[in-house]
Image (cartoon, helix red, strand yellow):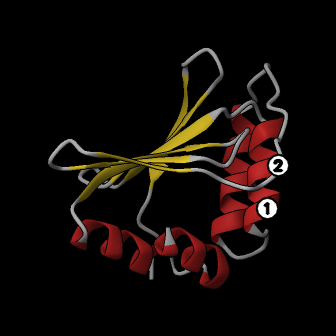
Amino acid sequence: NHFFERVRKDANFNAFLIDLEYNNIAYYIYFVATGNVKIITHAGHFISIKSNRKLIKVNSTPNTELIKLTSAKHFSGEHSYEKYCTDLATAGVFKWIVELNQKTRQYWSKDNQLLYIENAVMPL
């Protein structure tokens, strides 16, 4: 859990991904509405992290352009992590999955439709 707390504070996403890879994490799923995280290791083990954050209502109408804009603003340092989550909920994102082998971040709707895929590695 300390990996997630640290990246929310220091916004060093590349170091975050390196730490996850070093700890044998294959991918993780972040649930926007609850803030809960499910981590899956290369060995197939699951780790669940429950959030104490209040619930965020996720819009049922996806907006891909808002997802792209929200991501760009967050990863450029313009928006906080909290703003990133609330804006993604407004854009209809139910969950995102960071796949470490492919270095992608996938945004998914409530009805399990893939909305947008982006590179998870940020340019230095």
Name the one closer to the observer, 9 or 104.
9
Give the residue at the far top of this rendering: 111
Residue type, label 2:
Thr
Q: Is residue 39 left or right of residue 77?
A: left
Name the one closer to the observer, 121 or 24.
24
At 73% across and 38% down in the image, what residue appears? Answer: 33
Q: Is residue 74 left or right of residue 113?
A: right
Pointers 1 and 2 in contact (C-beta within 8 Å)? yes
Q: Quadrant of residue 120?
A: bottom left
Q: Quadrant of the C terminus?
A: bottom left
2, above or below 116, in the image:
below
81, above or below 42, in the image:
below
At 71% across and 42% down in the image, what residue appears? Answer: 34
6, above or below 61, in the image:
below
Q: Position of residue 59 (x, y in %)?
A: 82, 27
At 70% across and 65% down in the image, what residue appears? Answer: 74
Q: Position of residue 10 (x, y in %)?
A: 61, 85
Residue type, label 1:
Glu
Element at label 1: helix
The residue that disc 1 covers is: 82
Q: Is residue 26 left or right of residue 49?
A: left
Label tally: 2
Q: Position of residue 53 (x, y in %)?
A: 78, 55
Element at label 2: helix
Q: Residues within 10 Å of mark 1 (few under 14, many from 20)?
A: few
Q: Residues within 10 Å of mark 2 (few under 14, many from 20)?
A: some
Q: Position of residue 13 (x, y in %)?
A: 49, 73
The answer for how far apart the CA atoms under marks 1 and 2 are is 6 Å
Q: Quadrant of residue 116?
A: top right
The residue that disc 2 covers is: 86
Name the one closer to the observer, 29 or 76.
29
